[in-house]
Amino acid sequence: MPLSRSTLSAGWLPTEEFGQLLIADVVQQSVATNVGQPIQTNAQTMYFPRLTSEAPADFVAEGADLPLGDPGLDDVAVTPAKVAGLTIVTAEAVEDASPDVSKVVGDSLVRAISTKIDQAFVGNLPTPAPKGIASLTDVTDVTGSTPDSLTDLDVIADAIAAVQDEGGTPSHILVSPGVTKHLAKLKTGTGSNQPLLGVDATKPTVRTAYGLPLVTVRALSDSALYVVDGSRIAVVLRRTATVDISKDRYFESDRVAVRARARVGFGFLHPETIAKVGVALA
């Protein structure tokens, strides 16, 4: 159903600045851009250097030759893929509405695009979507074929240690809404009403485990959670986000099409610093 004058408070058309506002709002709302490192570019493809092995070093006697060698290097190529949304507005809403309509339509498009970005970020969507965490074959699997029932936080401690063992710095715990709810109900002991999870003093609504924030991702299933080093994840966004309108396609019904487009891709620079925990909730 198109947005109409009766549903809007209205005289609005997208401006050129609206595309950049779209990018800013997506960066603010998307889990991917809050967990990883958002990078804006005009390039079609970005290449990130990746260290695969260290340069040699050793203790040497005075006058002895120093160990000689090169670090192993390759790169991760990230080509942002298009993610887009389309909505329909009646001509009356466009002509008679106030500027507040831009927020109504803009918020809807931002939510839709942010949701799809997050689905791709944690998932393994088919092409042309960018590949996400679920597509990676070299993450550190903490539980293997035996998922954990999460009766305590021990397996999360194991996942944190696994990321650290790979040289990473754990930054976030990605969980589904169901796992968030389950963990929030865990208590410090039998008969206690004190929750096992901590609370971020600066953000009272954010729960923590071992000092790391739990990030609820609606696109995640209850079968896994991830401890990640967000500094090793690049979220690449093309600067040329656009919001366009067309009065032609729906000419016969006197409606206006509003289209938002952005491009995003993910670079997992050290997948081993992503620790997967299989989950089997009771």
Image (cartoon, helix red, strand yellow):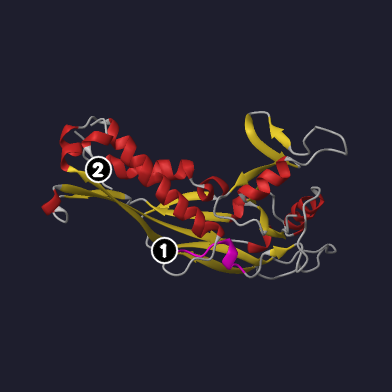
Residue 102 position (above or below residue 243): above
Cβ–Cβ under 8 Å for marks 2 and 1: no
Q: Residue at x 37, y 62 (%)?
A: 44
Q: Residue at x 69, y 66 (%)?
A: 55
Counting from the top left corner in percent of width and height, residue 73 is at 60, 68
Q: Secondary structure at mark 2?
A: loop
Q: Pointer 2: residues within 10 angstroms few (<14), some, or many (20+)?
A: few
Q: Depth-wise, is mark 2 or mark 1 nearer the camera?
A: 2
Q: How far apart are the alpha carbons under marks 2 and 1? A: 24 Å
Counting from the top left corner in percent of width and height, residue 241 is at 33, 50
Side of 174 relative to 108 (left or right): right
Q: Residue at x 33, y 41 (%)?
A: 106
Regarding residue 21, the answer to whether it shows in the image is no
Q: Residue furthest right?
A: 190
State whether the magenta stretch is mostly helix, strand or loop: loop
Q: Secondary structure at mark 1?
A: loop
Residue indicated by mark 2: 16
| Quarter occupied by the C terminus | bottom right
Regarding residue 201, the answer to whether it shows in the image is yes
Q: Which mark is residue 75?
A: none
Within the image, what quadrant is residue 56 found in? bottom right
Say which label, 2 or 1, has the lower sequence index: 2
Q: Amino acid at mark 2?
A: Glu
Counting from the top left corner in percent of width and height, residue 103 is at 33, 35
Membership of 138 in magenta stretch:
no
Residue indicated by mark 1: 45
Q: Amino acid at mark 1?
A: Thr
Counting from the top left corner in percent of width and height, residue 66 is at 75, 66
**Magenta stretch?**
129-136
Within the image, what quadrant is residue 279 found in? bottom right
**Which is more toward the observer, 78 or 180?**
180
